[in-house]
Amino acid sequence: MRKVDIGFVESCESWEVESRFFPSKIGGKPAWLDLKNLPEYSQIACDYCKNPCIFLCQIYAPYTEEEKAFHRTLFIFICRDPNCCKANENGNLKVFRSQLQRINEYYPPNPPEENENWRKDIQIEKWRKTCQVCGIVANSHCAKCKKTNYCCRAHQIIDWKSVHKKYCGSDENITSTDIVFPQFELVMEEENDDDGDDDDDDNDSEKEENEIVSNDNSEENCLKKSTYDKLVGSLQNVDDVDLDLMNFANNKEDTSFLKFKNRIQSNPDQVIRYDRGGSPLYISSLNHAQNIPKCEECNGDRQFEFQIMPQMLHHLKVEDSLTSLDWGIIAIFTCKRSCTPKAGYASEYIWKQDITEC
């Protein structure tokens, strides 16, 4: 079985996931790698509502064999508006790749020291103005104090109503948390050889079907919430069950779901699967990634690098699971050569597979 790295959520102190430590993390504001050449607002805006997408997660994934990518991080953004979360479409998602040589203008060549006070001078504020609310590039500021920056008027209004009205003009650097997702560190480890089994023989398939497929459509044989939570993570600690997932679980023809369930059963709380040059672990037999576009920077081929699992939704504390953000898997495809971005951050390709028949 191919070796895959899997990622888990872990609580952390805010300083541990700052740019100076090259973190992998979920939520909060992006810990930018290139501290000067940030993506512009228009690049991060949702294709549908045109509001800025919010930082979802980032993966530190250097190409050790390439000096030009000695430091390398992938950043994922998503629109928080559930109306923009359309089945099997990716217009509400953005992915960017940034990379630096070992010798660069921001970071020392030696590894960082895991100490809160180490190189606190390495801060994005030295190079660019970023939004107080979401952390992306800011083009405006508070007209009253002229110290607090925002990417758009909507975020300025949110921050003003939440905290800035009280602290405007003071030295307190307090910001609204109404927009960003809860922040966690991502810890990666290698998937063990016995974590799941890719054997597709008839006996194993039959065993999987017997475990989760209803043979007589009786209510007691339907997929229960406890099974749902174990297989693909809880979207919320509520009583609602994702009906689309139940439909797929009860579809004995969907071998991709059976394989997905079997592969993750030893680590049901994984939120990331990293398999550069491999293939996504699909959650459905429908809507597999096809016709991946060429790299927009060098016109070279892209390859699969990692995927975000549905289990991550549980940690985002999204609203009602039936009307808010949702996905089956999110697969990220990146330039096979990891070419040097022309402007600090290169757009890469993202594929969202949902658990529907849309």
Image: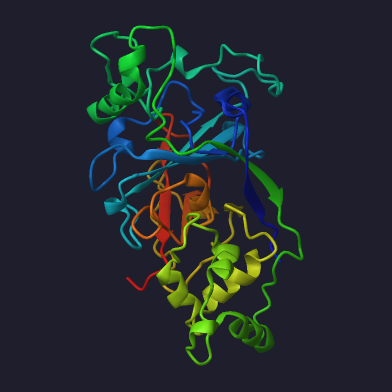
For residue 323, side relative to residue 315 (left or right)? left
Residue 212 drawn at (x, y percent): 57, 79
Instruction: Determine whether 24 is above or below 121 in the image.
Output: below
Residue at the image position 30 percent from the left and 58 percent from the top: 86
Marks counted in the figure total: 0
Residue at the image position 66 percent from the left and 18 percent from the top: 116
Q: Say which of 223 and 142 sits in front.
A: 223
Display coloring: rainbow
Q: Say which of 134 and 32 sits in front.
A: 134
Residue 148 in sight from this viewpoint: no
Q: Say which of 88 and 85 sits in front.
A: 85
Viewport quadrant of the N terminus? bottom right
Residue 17, quarter of the rendered image: top right
Residue 195 drawn at (x, y percent): 72, 64
Instruction: Determine whether 93 is above or below 161 in the image.
Output: below
Residue at the image position 66 percent from the left and 52 percent from the top: 5
Residue 130 drawn at (x, y percent): 38, 22
Residue 54 in sight from this viewpoint: yes
Viewport quadrant of the C terminus? bottom left
Residue 246 drawn at (x, y percent): 46, 74
Residue 95, quarter of the rendered image: top left
For residue 339, side relative to residue 5 (left or right)? left
